[in-house]
Amino acid sequence: MTQPEAIIEAFKALGGTKNKYEIEEYVCQKYGDLWKDFGTPMADMVPISCGGNSSSNVREDLRVLERVNPGEYRLITN
């Protein structure tokens, strides 16, 4: 399990718009303290077409978040 995969799982389980603290709490409860930072990875999961970071190393198929407000994200729905 990669951190982006765990973040996606958390969004699917929790639903709606979430911030890094809510996602971190879910992931840490389920997987332990494997990752330290959630803000940058979540920002890197926004596709370029939605204003995401062009220097992100996150695979394109895992770039499934949209920024709703600063620090708040949700899964992109098609």
Image: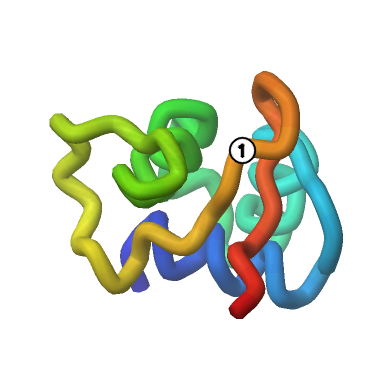
The relative height of residue 5 versus residue 68 in the rendered view (above or below) is: below
Residue 10, above or below 25: below
| Figure quadrant of residue 13 | bottom right
Which quadrant is the C terminus positioned in? bottom right
Measuring from the top left, give residue 20's x and y in whole percent. Answer: 66, 35
Number of callouts in the render? 1
Q: What secondary structure is found at the residue carrying circle 1?
A: strand
| Residue furthest top in the image | 70
Residue type for callout 1: Arg
Q: Nearer the viewer, residue 4 or 17?
A: 17
Query: In the depicted view, which residue is nearer to us: 6 or 57?
Result: 57
Drawn side of residue 42 relative to residue 1, left or right: right
User: Which residue bears the numbered disc 1?
Assistant: 67
Image x and y of residue 32, in percent: 57, 55
Task: Please report the residue visible at 49 percent of the width from the left and 41 percent of the height from the top.
Answer: 42
Q: Is residue 9 left or right of residue 52?
A: right
Q: Percent from the top left, x then y, of residue 64?
A: 47, 63
**Image coloring type:** rainbow
Position of 3 with respect to 8 (left or right) is left
Depth order, front residue of 54/25: 54
Residue beneath the point at 23% across and 63% down? 60
Closer to us: 57 or 10: 57
The location of residue 7, given as percent across then percent down, is 54, 59
Task: Give the quadrant of the N terminus.
Answer: bottom left
Q: Residue at x 43, y 69 (%)?
A: 5
Mark 1 is surrounded, within 10 Å at the Cα level, by few (under 14), some (14 to 19) or many (20 or more) other residues, namely many
